[in-house]
Amino acid sequence: MHNDKKAVLEGLLFLVGDEGLNGDQLASVMEMPLEELESLLDEMMKEYVEDESRGMEIVHFGGVYKFVSKEAIHPYAEKLFASVKLATLSQAALETLAIIAYRQPITRSEIEEIRGVGCDMMIRKLLARNLIRECGRSDAAGRPFLYEVTEAFMDSFQLKSLKELPELPNSDANLDEELFQED
C-alpha cells in the first residue's frame, strides 16, 4: 500500500504541474494524516534526488510540493529551446504569450478564462523557452503564481517596452457594432 500511495502522489503532482499542491490539499485528497503524508513526501523527495536515472525531482517551496527538472537537465533544455525559433510557436502558445504580455501579471486560471481552454502545457513551454517567468503569487485562493514576459520576449519581438505593443481594439464595442448593424 505504501508504494500505491507514492504512485498516487506522483500522479497528482504531475497532473497539477507548476502550480503544485500544498500538504493540506494532498492530505485531504489522500485521506491520510498530514504528518504521515509529509513523511511519505520527504521519503519520495530523497528517492528522486538520489536516483540519478531520473530527470525530475520533487521540491517543497513555500508550502507547495511540485515536480521540477533536475539541475543537470537545464543545459540541455536551454539547447533544445534555443534551437527552436520563435516562429515555430504554435497558435495556442502565441495566444497565451499575447495574453500574458497585455495583462501581466496574470495567473494561469485567468489566462484559461480568457482563452477558454487549459494552458498548463503552454505555460510550461513558454517558461522553458524563457519567454515568460513567475513574478510572484496572487492573493487569490490557493495563491497561484503570477506570470509576466521576460527580456527574452522583448528581444524576440524587438520591443524596448511593452508600450510598443499594438493597441488592442475595443473588442466589446466592435462586436456590438457588428452584431447590431442593419444590412
Image (cartoon, rainbow, N blue to C red):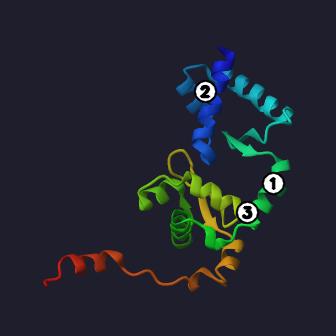
Q: Which mark is residue 81?
A: 3
Going from N to C along the chain, the mark reached first, 2 or 3, is 2
Numbered label attached to residue 74: 1
Closer-to-camera residue (95/19): 95
Residue occupied by mark 2: 8
Looking at the rendering, which quadrant does residue 117 occupy? bottom left
Q: Position of residue 177 (x, y in %)?
A: 23, 81
Give, as a three-letter code, the residue at label 2.
Val
Q: Quadrant of the N terminus?
A: top right
User: In which image quadrant can residue 175 be found?
Assistant: bottom left
Front position among marks 3 and 1? 3
Residue at screen point 78% across, 42% down: 55
Q: CA distance from mark 2 to mark 1?
A: 27 Å
Q: Is residue 130 visible?
A: yes
28 up-or-down from 157: above or below: above
Kind of residue at disc 1: His
Residue toward you, 106 or 166: 166
Q: Residue at x 71, y 74 (%)?
A: 151
- Identify the secondary structure beneath mark 3: helix
Q: Quadrant of the C terminus?
A: bottom left
Q: Which of the marked residues, 3 or 1, is nearer the chain's N terminus? A: 1
Q: Callout 2: 10 Å neighbours few (<14), some, many (20+)? A: few
Q: Position of residue 17 (x, y in %)?
A: 61, 45
What amino acid is at disc 3? Answer: Phe
Please report the residue visible at 44 percent of the width from the left and 80 percent of the height from the top.
Answer: 168
Q: Tell which tag, 2 or 3, sits nearer the viewer.
A: 3
